[in-house]
Image: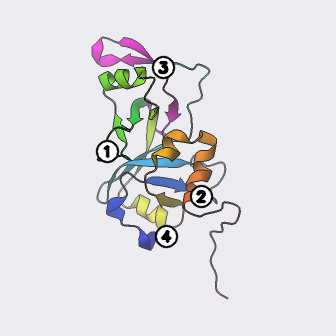
Amino acid sequence: MGSSITYESLAGKLLIAAPHTDPDSYFARTVIYLAKYNHNEGAVGVVVNHPFPSSSSELIIKDCLKNDEVFSLEHTEAYVGGPIESERGFILHSHQTCSYYPSSIYSSSNVGLLKNISSEKSHPHKMFVFGYCGWRKEQLEAEIKRGYWFVLPLDNKIIFETTNAEKWDRALECLNISPIKYSNRSGNC
């Protein structure tokens, strides 16, 4: 898989955890949207299939820039995006009306935008994410070469229209990989 990947093109792709990932690992069965990638600097991504464990259907957000103004996020599911800066949040969203880039995803921590998008009941392609995943220079490339991750082109349907429990399976299916039949071992006959 590593030989067919152009590493300059990883930004905007999905990382899919390999089926042999330790089930107790943080990254077991994860689907990650790669928001930023630079071969010389590393990569930043967010897990898009681990909903935030909350007993409430509403998140309360505090805007520290506006004298601690508080507002709620309605109609927006929250996710654990990764272990780094888990107290920091931002929104992932897409604009279905954008004909030039129909599969683009945007991320922002702009509070005004967050308020606007979260109040739009008719905008189903959005999620609030706490934290992120990060890889230092050349770390992600090495993990892909070792078979820890598969790379899939961006698919908004997987991120926004597939249930969280099915996202990983659906992403592997798009790659024609069966988790049951997959083996990370190779050998000679």
The span from disc 1 to disc 2 (Cα, nearest Å) is: 27 Å
- Residue 157, compared with residue 142, is above or below; it is above
Earlier-in-chain disc, 1 versus 3: 3
Rate crowding at label 2 as few (under 14), some (14 to 19) or many (20 or more) other CA atoms within 10 Å.
few
Residue 85 appears in the figure: no
Q: Which numbered disc, 1 or 3, marks the residue closer to the eye?
A: 1
Q: Residues within 10 Å of mark 4 (few under 14, many from 20)?
A: few
Q: Residue furthest bottom?
A: 189
Q: Position of residue 47 (x, y in %)?
A: 50, 43
Quadrant hosting residue 69: top left
Disc 4 to disc 1, C-alpha distance: 31 Å
**Image marks 1 and 2: residues in contact by CB distance under 8 Å:** no
| Circle nearer the N terminus (4, 2) | 4
Image coordinates of residue 149 in percent, x first then y, are 52, 59
Helix, strand or loop at disc 3? Answer: loop
Q: Report crowding for label 3: few under 14, some 14 to 19, many 20 or more residues within 10 A (C-alpha).
A: some
**Nearest to viewer (mark 1 / mark 2):** 1
Q: Tags 2 and 3 in contact by the CB under 8 Å rule?
A: no
Please say if the residues under marks 4 and 1 sit with CB atoms less than 8 Å apart: no
Q: Which mark is residue 22?
A: none
For the residue marked with disc 3, what is the amino acid? Glu
Which residue carries the number 4 mark?
1
Label placed on residue 99: 1
Q: Nearer the viewer, residue 71 or 102?
A: 102
